[in-house]
Image (cartoon, rainbow, N blue to C red):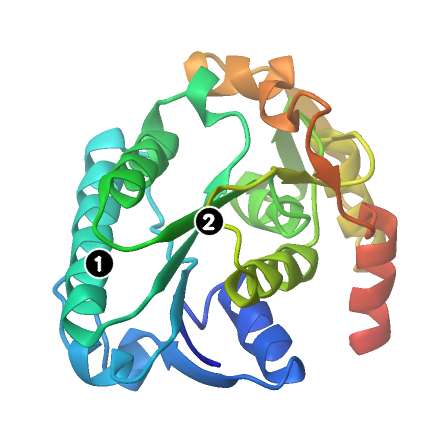
Amino acid sequence: MRIAVAGATGTVGRHVVVAAERHGHEVVPLSRSTGQDVSTGLGLDDALTGADAVIDVTSVASTSAAASVAFFGAATRHLLDAEVRQGVGHHVALSIVGIDALPIGYYAGKVEQERLVAAGPVAFSILRATQFHEFARQVLGRASFGPIALVPAGLLRPIAAADVAEALVLIAEGTERGRHRGLRGPRDETLFDMVRKVIRADARRMPVLGVSLPGAYWRGMRSGVLRGTGHEAEAPTTFDDWLAGERADA
């Protein structure tokens, strides 16, 4: 198969490229660095020529609902329009477990993306997954204040981005369409413990203080609503396994 990967250089996208190539597929990475821009549609028609499927794992670094809806709305429309013109038969979108209960901020854009994909002209698959293991390191980067890390309270069921990528490639290969069974990690984790483990793995000394932040987003994070309901499939890689793999690759 010829599979185009939108967001190919991102947290999940780089793993999708590796997984698809490992499965023997011809991979077309879509990113600004390779001349495609999903926000404007630039370069998409040429890149999607002859593609059998598109796996969309694009993202935007914003917690603004308006910015997120604008980005995912534009990106999804441009991808679907180009897919129709080029005869692409399958659009695979990655979304997030639990966003129906928390359709705010960044998640508002994912809700809009799902709506457009499901109502669109291309046969689709949507896979929802929980927060990535990589989230802990991202939080640490934003939560470090001098020698101290102030970490918001959060209850998660994190998953390895590589496990999500493998599932997306299998969906692209398969014949099932529509909303697929969600995917979550194998074990509950608190964001506090995840960040503390990252600090230890990096051989750093930094006190970690837990904080309870206000607002609907952080209330939702504390509630565990983004962990899923238990009806999701469970990926194999624990947070500890993922950290050990990071150390082995260093």
Q: Residue at coordinates 33% horizontally, 51% vertically from top-left? A: 60
Q: Quadrant of the C terminus?
A: bottom right
Q: Position of residue 88 (x, y in %)?
A: 29, 70
Tag 1 or tag 2, which sits nearer the N-term? 1
User: For mark 2, what is the residue?
Assistant: 177
**In-image side of 67 versus 234 (left or right):** left
In the rendered image, residue 200, in percent from the top left (x then y), is placed at 85, 51
Q: Amino acid at mark 2?
A: Arg
Residue at the image point whose x is 70% and y is 26% from the top: 231
When the figure is inspected, residue 27 is found, relative to residue 37, above or below; the finding is below
Q: Amino acid at mark 1?
A: Leu
Q: CA distance from mark 2 to mark 1?
A: 16 Å
The residue labelled by disc 1 is 80
Residue 77 in view, yes or no? yes
Residue 39 visible, this orientation = no
In depth, the one of 213 and 66 nearer the eye is 66
Please give the name of the residue rendered at 30% of the width and 41% of the height, measured from the top-left corner: 113
Quadrant of res 37: bottom left
Q: How many marks?
A: 2
Secondary structure of the residue carrying tag 2 is loop
Q: Which mark is residue 120?
A: none
